[in-house]
Image: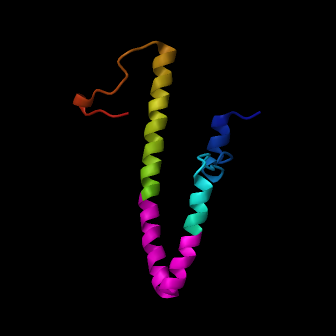
Amino acid sequence: MKTILEALYRGQIQPEETIVPSHPEYRPLSRQISAQTEQWRNRLGEEAFRELEEYFDLCDSVESMHVEAAFLQGFRLGANLMIEVMSKREGLAPNPASGLSL
């Protein structure tokens, strides 16, 4: 049996491909987005809609970078929390005055 770390290293674990939010409003909002996307496509025409899609692709790229940074910071926080718990050490929390981050 492989460890989680081995599977992650080998690319066998890809959680971003299987995440489906459990929030009850997720699916209705997703359907609403799809319906409104079609309405805008019909209203704007293909050329203008393609330009709008390119704009939204740029927005998605920035959002993805933000989500990645949030994930990394959260993961580091969790790892530091585990180190603190397992070692019973104190003083691992970042000091805002020092400018140090996780």
Q: Farthest right residue?
A: 1
Figure label count: 0
Which coloring applies here? rainbow
Q: Is residue 43 left or right of residue 102?
A: right
Q: What stretch is highlighted in magenta?
A: 35-62
Q: In which quarter of the image is the C terminus?
A: top left
Q: Position of residue 67 (x, y in %)?
A: 46, 50
Q: Where is residue 6 in the image (x, y as percent from the top left)?
A: 66, 38
Q: Determine the residue positioned at 43% across, 54% down.
A: 65
Q: Farthest left residue?
A: 97
Whether residue 46 appears in magenta in the rendering, the answer is yes
Of the pair 36 and 77, the residue shown nearer to us? 36
Whether residue 88 appears in magenta in the rendering, the answer is no
Q: Position of residue 79 (x, y in %)?
A: 49, 29
Q: Farthest top residue?
A: 88
Q: In which quarter of the image is the N terminus?
A: top right
Of the pair 12 and 17, the residue shown nearer to us? 17
Above-or-below relation of 63 to 45: above
Q: Determine the residue positioned at 42% across, 72% down.
A: 55
Q: Where is residue 34 in the image (x, y as percent from the top left)?
A: 59, 69
Corner quadrant of residue 94: top left
Q: Determine the residue positioned at 35% across, 18% down.
A: 91
Corner quadrant of residue 33: bottom right
Q: Determine the residue positioned at 43% across, 46% down.
A: 69
Above-or-below relation of 15 to 80: below
